[in-house]
Amino acid sequence: MAHFPSLSEAIRELVHDGDTIALEGFTHLIPYAAGHEIIKQGRRDLTIVRLTPDLLYDQMIGMGCVRKMIFAWGGNPGVGMLHRFRDAIENGWPHALEIEELSHAALSVALTAGASGLPMGILRGFIGSDLPKYNKNIKFITCPFSGDKLAAVRAINPDVSIIHAQKADRKGNVLLWGIIGVQKECALAAKNCLVTVEEIVDELDAPPNACILPSWTVHSVCHVPGGAFPSYVHDYYERNNAAYIEWDAISKSRETFSQWMETHIMKAKNFEQFKESLSAHST
């Protein structure tokens, strides 16, 4: 049965220096609150995994938490590039960043293999691509049945996977809906899974074929309303597009980035205070 600690307690217990962690969410349900707590607790040398790293991973990279990133696409969606990510790659600030790039399909397959207890995942892909030249974990094999040339990628098994969801019941079963990415695969592939939720209820009232993570797949559930802000949560709140637009200017220089992080994240007692600080201060 899942535990119900505070978010700070859960991060302190589950996330350690040098871990491989996945903070997943696809356009919505992005676990910003959990990521900010990792930053505030000063974790270092992390390998971070995500299909589409955006502002949250830019913040973690800029604050020196990350040694390596495994990803398929990185950017500020609808706006442009991630400036802290680029600075780390081009200039080694705040320190050098190692990257392992895959396609969306290949990273999904790698996580699915990890969730299935397999050493690798197989797909049709990368024919004519340069990525295998730069990623040693992309190999080609011959199918023993058809003779086809197929791509193989190493399975990914995070130490901790962290996701945000709409609901959990008091037994620790988790329900999420709307656009679903690879949250289920991440949860099942990881040694431990932490879920932040909008609400904890007596009954999930899940419709047929809903995406449910049973309690035995989840280590900790943390009640963090609004924990995906500034991304959105289907049926709960909308995406804060202004925050994404403003991040472009905030993150361009090391000075404005560092000042913003100190003001809005490091000094915030909790995630609710972080959200309030954005309203009280101009960016």
Image (spheres, rainbow, N blue to C red):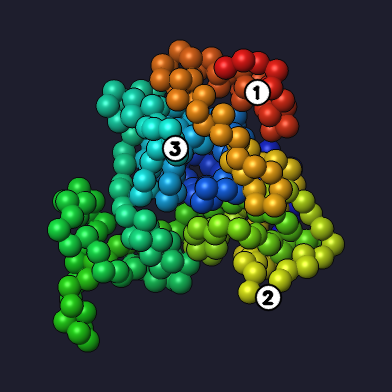
Comparing 207 with 45, the one in front is 207
Q: Give the residue at mark 3.
A: 78
Q: Residue at x 31, y 47 (%)?
A: 100
Disc number for residue 149: none
Distance of mark 1 from mark 3, alpha carbons?
21 Å
What residue type is disc 1 on? Leu
What residue type is disc 2 on? Pro
Task: Answer whether labels 2 and 1 touch (C-beta < 8 Å).
Answer: no
- Mark 1 neighbour class, 10 Å CA radius: few under 14, some 14 to 19, many 20 or more: some
Between discs 2 and 1, the one toward the N terminus: 2
Examine the rendering and report whether any part of residue 23 can be seen: yes
Label 1: element kind: helix
Comparing 62 with 42, the one in front is 62
Quadrant in the picture for residue 53: top left
Between discs 2 and 3, the one toward the N terminus: 3
Q: Residue at x 34, y 25 (%)?
A: 87
Q: Give the residue at mark 2.
A: 208
